[in-house]
Amino acid sequence: MPGSKDPGPSVKDDEVYEKLRDEGNSKEKSARIANATANSSRTQVGRKGGESGSYDDWHVEALRERAGELDIPGRSTMTKRELIDALRFH
């Protein structure tokens, strides 16, 4: 239903999901984080991050490969900056 804020039965923590969506995160990312927090404490999930390197340090070929894994459209013609933005805000 258009405009419905109900994330559906697959999301385990509706409160976290809605907060993340309000911040502008994608549905996929919001659901992933909401489900991770439901499986453990929110504090533990927050501490878990920060292990991945910065996309700024990646080569364009690696960025395109990662964008392909996420099925980001138009990746073959994107510049490095566009790829980084697409990956960060996917």
Image: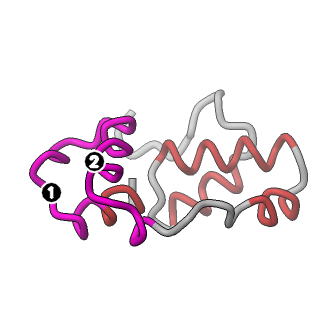
Q: What residue is rendered at 42% in x and 62% in y?
A: 88
Taking the image as shown, residue 14 lies to the left or right of residue 24, namely right
Amino acid under label 2? Arg
Could you tell me residue 24's position as x and y percent?
A: 45, 64
Viewer-side residue, 17 vs 1: 17
Q: Main secondary structure of the magenta part?
A: helix
> Which numbered tag is attached to residue 64?
2
Work out whether 56 lies above or below 65: below
Q: Is residue 72 magenta?
A: yes
The numbered dot on residue 78 is 1
Q: Which quadrant would residue 70 be assigned to in this image?
A: top left
Image x and y of residue 63, in percent = 33, 53
Q: Which residues are magenta?
A: 55-83
Q: Which residue is pictured at 65% across the width and 28% down the height?
A: 9
Q: Secondary structure at mark 2?
A: helix
Total numbered badges shown on the rendered structure: 2
Give coordinates of residue 51: x percent, y percent: 68, 61
Which element type, helix, strand or loop, lies under badge 1? loop
| Other-residue count near label 1 (Cα within 10 Å), few / some / many at <14 / 14–19 / ≥20 | some
Within-10-Å neighbours for mark 2: few <14, some 14–19, many 20+: many
Give yes or no for contact between labels 2 and 1 (Cβ–Cβ under 8 Å): yes
Residue under the point 42% across and 69% down:
57
Please state the horizontal and vertical placement of residue 62, each as a whole percent of the image.
35, 50
- The residue depicted at 48 percent of the width and 59 percent of the height is 25
- CA distance for labels 2 and 1: 8 Å
Q: Quadrant of the N terminus?
A: top left
Task: Name the side, left or right, on which 20 lies relative to 72.
Answer: right
